[in-house]
Image (cartoon, coloured by chain):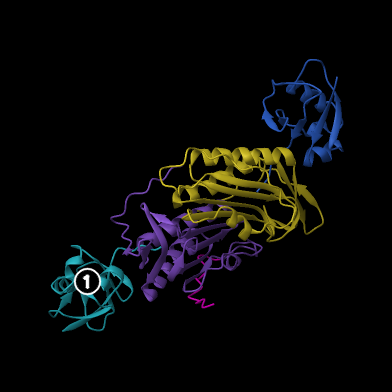
Chain colours: A purple, B yellow, C blue, D cyan
Amino acid sequence: MRWRSFRRWPVAEAAASAPSAAQSGGWIAIVEQPIDVTSLIARVSDGSVGAISTFLGTVRHVNDGRDVTGIEYHAYQPMAERELALIADETCTASPGLRLAIEHRVGTLGIGEVSVAIAASHPRRAPALAATTYVIEALKRRVPIWKCEHYVDGSRAWVDPTTSVAPSTPL
Amino acid sequence: MRWRSFRRWPVAEAAASAPSAAQSGGWIAIVEQPIDVTSLIARVSDGSVGAISTFLGTVRHVNDGRDVTGIEYHAYQPMAERELALIADETCTASPGLRLAIEHRVGTLGIGEVSVAIAASHPRRAPALAATTYVIEALKRRVPIWKCEHYVDGSRAWVDPTTSVAPSTPL
Amino acid sequence: MTIHVLLFASYADAFGARRLAVPVPVPCRVDDLVTALRGLPGGHVLPSKPLVAVNHAWVPGDVSITTQDEVAVIPPVAGG
Amino acid sequence: MTIHVLLFASYADAFGARRLAVPVPVPCRVDDLVTALRGLPGGHVLPSKPLVAVNHAWVPGDVSITTQDEVAVIPPVAGG
């Protein structure tokens, strides 16, 4: 698979007194092949980790009331990687000990396929849980990726979140 | 593997107008064998899902400053299953369209092994992300499960969260 | 009457049993059972208000129990 | 001078190109480039303040650009 190693972030601060102190760091990639969630989780796992939070975005068969057959994802790849790295840096800097792995897929995806996967680990659960939410919100706001939805009737359209019907988000 | 099917929750409310409206529901189990995260995610996945959030608890090699070699998990199984089902019910009732799968492992686990896994899916990301946090916090408060840590020096101790050193949780 | 109490984890270790027959007054509330339990060897480990479940549900101390109920006295939970 | 602008998604469709040579004044700010781009066929799709990146970083409209810069005019992002 065409994983691309982008960078390893530097340790956010000097290791704490315990030799087992976790180090911040991460992995980001824009990929063309299906995302392997197990491998992504393995990238943030080791004996110092107590909590792993993941977020997966998947292709739905309906969006804003229209029946979708698939989605084409396009990226401005070098900038998308740079923005993902910046987001990861910010998140790890805010949360020493955090480890992050982020992959976004491009190309044509079918219903149910994973378009984006984020895995965050930390010795404690609160930072791991907070990190996935922070990263997906920042990614949706800042990373230059676009999606073109293909509909049952054969038409297609670029998704513009600035004009979409506002989703209702209970809970 | 000795998965135990506990229950499927009823649909929280009548399906919305769209025939593709997601249904709330879930899976819970107390298991003795290693938790298969991919299978758990599959339990909450289908074409109506746009977001899947997971949380994994893993065994750390150090806790409150002591070197750990492994953890023995014990459950009051029928009550643990009942409490997990109640928590899942509450979460799905608060968030129509949510699907949940929760497994907690019992027995002796080595460093890095997954003790608890929660997968939550929803058409939208906010309810999926909120659900994993809600479930793990409720689980830690209410589900009758205990852990006995085994230390490098051969000693062991039951973990009492009511007297543990308070963790620092940045971010 | 006698209530058969389920014990777990540190409580099972302290009382040296996972199931204990405890003589109690009739009628018996959860608090009465805890008082009786505290008088047995190992009973010193119990806090003033230990967690108790009857028939797999958490209950407060003033709930009545009978020999038909499944009663468990539960140490601080530590799942996850 | 001529700035080679990268276009994506709906903008690439509207202009019929993923890379476009745009004649601009010297010196040139991002806003000047956007104005020039708006005068070309397809330019009607641009909002008043489209997103622009120079050398892979988001920039405001008053940033100066040269022929050495990698300039991209970017439609609303929709990753995730």
Confirm whether residue C1 shows in the render.
yes
Residue at 70 percent of width and 21 percent of height: C63
Q: Is residue C51 left or right of residue C7?
A: left
Q: Quadrant of residue D34?
A: bottom left
Say which residue appears at 40% left-offset and 72% top-offset.
A82
Answer left or right for C55 relative to A149.
Answer: right
Q: Residue at x 56, y 68 (%)?
A: A36
Q: Quadrant of residue B75?
A: top right
Give percent across and percent down for residue A121: 57, 60
Of all residues, the one furthest to the top in this rendering is C27
User: What span is in magenta?
Assistant: A1-14
For this view, does B59 lie left or right of residue A131? right
Q: Residues within 10 Å of mark 1 (few under 14, many from 20)?
A: few
Residue C57, picture quadrant: top right
- Residue B109 in the magenta stretch? The answer is no
Q: Amino acid at mark 1?
A: Val
